[in-house]
């Protein structure tokens, strides 16, 4: 009988712990503002599901990752996203894919993925890649030169970049641990926001003259996604 009295509190504690540690689904978009009236809802966190009886093979298929994208742009790269918008069957599967084409000396500028980690494999050419840890870990820079067939991992929320150091084009494929990992290109976000962040705020944050910020605000910040 004593054993029963001993095990019962443990069972209750275990149940409470499991309930307390349960988490909400991860966000799949930048924001999802709540509404009380369903008829005014336009978006959900992800996508609505198709009737299973209407699902076709085409819902899980995409053709075109063998196509070179136009890389004649200011950053010298272009990204072909393979997320749930391109392959509806990816919805709820927590995965996506991307092809990145790099011009000679082109780059994928410093950016983060707010909702997923990335594993990158080089399939053509050479890439110099890097990732920076958080302030908590001393903003350490991890870099590597990747040849064909080599892989590098970028953790969720960490600033990272890729640069083609050669005079020939490069191609890489990236797998992401989200059906919509999102991308925040640092320069575009800081200096190309709409409306602009006030120059005096940025000047103090970056510890430069306000004229430098005004110059950067006037630049065209190209989005290659």
Image (cartoon, grey):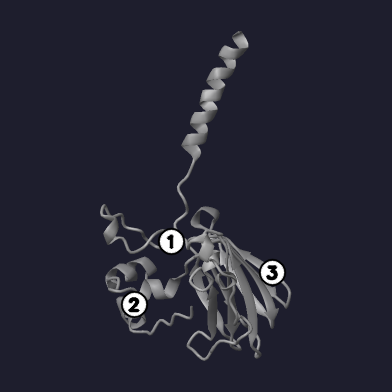
In this orientation, which residue lies closer to the viewer: 130 or 55?
Answer: 55
Disc 1 to disc 3, C-alpha distance: 34 Å
Q: Residues within 10 Å of mark 2 (few under 14, many from 20)?
A: some
Q: Is residue 19 above or below residue 67?
A: above
Residue 76 percent location from the top left of the image: 53, 86
Circle on res. 213: 2
Q: Is residue 191 above or below residue 96?
A: below
* Residue that appears at 54% across and 79% down: 79
Residue 157 seen in the current view: no
* Residue that appears at 36% across and 60% down: 31
Residue 72 percent location from the top left of the image: 52, 91
Circle on res. 151: 3
Q: SS class of the residue under badge 1?
A: loop
Specify the farthest residue to the front: 53
In this orientation, which residue lies closer to the viewer: 106 or 33?
Answer: 33
Classify the position of the N terminus by image quarter. Answer: top right
Residue 152 percent location from the top left of the image: 66, 67
Q: Is residue 198 above or below residue 1?
A: below
């Amino acid at each position: 009988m004593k054993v029963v009295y001993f095990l019962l509190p443990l069972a209750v504690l275990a149940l409470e712990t499991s309930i307390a540690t349960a988490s909400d689904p991860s966000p799949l978009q930048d924001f999802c503002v709540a509404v009380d009236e369903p008829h005014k809802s336009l978006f959900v966190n992800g996508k609505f599901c198709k009737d299973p009886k209407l699902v076709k093979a085409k819902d899980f298929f995409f053709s075109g990752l063998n196509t070179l994208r136009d890389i004649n742009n200011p950053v010298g790269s272009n990204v072909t996203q393979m997320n749930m918008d391109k392959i509806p069957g990816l919805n709820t599967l927590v995965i996506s894919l991307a092809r990145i084409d790099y011009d000679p000396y082109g780059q994928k500028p410093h950016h983060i993925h707010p909702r997923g980690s990335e594993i990158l494999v080089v399939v053509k050419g050479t890439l110099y890649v890097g990732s920076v840890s958080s302030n908590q870990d001393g903003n350490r820079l991890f870099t590597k030169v990747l040849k064909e067939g080599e892989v590098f991992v970028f953790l969720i929320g960490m600033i990272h970049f890729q640069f083609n150091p050669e005079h020939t084009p490069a191609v890489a494929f990236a797998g992401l641990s989200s059906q919509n990992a999102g991308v925040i290109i640092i320069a575009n976000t800081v200096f190309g926001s709409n409306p602009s962040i006030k120059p005096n705020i940025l000047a103090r944050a970056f510890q430069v003259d306000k004229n430098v910020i005004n110059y950067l605000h006037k630049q065209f910040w190209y989005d290659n996604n």
